[in-house]
Amino acid sequence: MTTDFFKRVWAFLLFCLVQALVLNHIHLLGYATPLLFVDFVLSFRRGTARWAILLWCFALGLCIDIFSNTPGVASGSMTLMGLLQPYLLEPFVPRDSADDLVPSMRTLGVGKFITYALIMVVIFTVTFFALEAFSFFNWQQWLITVGSSFALTFILILVIENIWNK
């Protein structure tokens, strides 16, 4: 239990620092911004208490908001992801698996993990940029921003997942 807690704290600090110091300054073609901290939500164990997931997600979102000057955008989006994560994970987990299963390509299989990550990242990017824009006046630019940021974030998550599983 304590080892898992310290790994979670380490991941929390790492995602917060990488997002704030590096990834927030990347804007490919003026639209695509990688939001890699959503990978923090993808890796919660199956049996983790829902209140703990919500608390961790809100705290990470709040830290990202503080360092990125996006008041409430990341914390609201991450809290939504923390709320949905147990329900979106359950259809992809084999019935006979352990309660402490960590979702990854190795444990879920490549196809199931890609589908799980795809759904989570789409919901997150749509929520994040809808809260950030708070208007659909320029919906073409919003759609390009959501699509390009989704693609960049999803590719980075798959790359990191492949690196961790080797």
Image: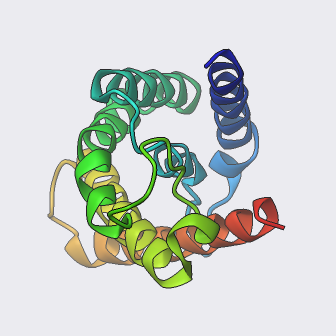
Q: Residue at x 48, y 77 (%)?
A: 114
Q: Quadrant of residue 61?
A: top left
Give how far across and how far down residue 155 sits, in percent: 61, 75
Image location (x, y in percent) of residue 39: 55, 51
Image quarter where the C terminus lies is bottom right
Residue 139 shown left or right of residue 117 in the figure? left
Residue projecting furthest to the right: 166
**Residue visible at 73% across and 34% down in the picture:** 14
Indicate the position of residue 58 as horizontal and vertical percent values: 38, 25
- Foreground: 112 or 101? 101
Q: Nearer the viewer, residue 107 or 43?
A: 107
Residue at the outermost bottom position: 111
Q: Position of residue 165 (x, y in %)?
A: 76, 64
Query: Residue, x 25% and y 45% (percent of image)?
Result: 131
Along the line of sight, which residue is nearer the eye, 103 or 23? 103
Quadrant in which residue 78 is drawn: top left
In the figure, 44 relative to 90: above or below? above
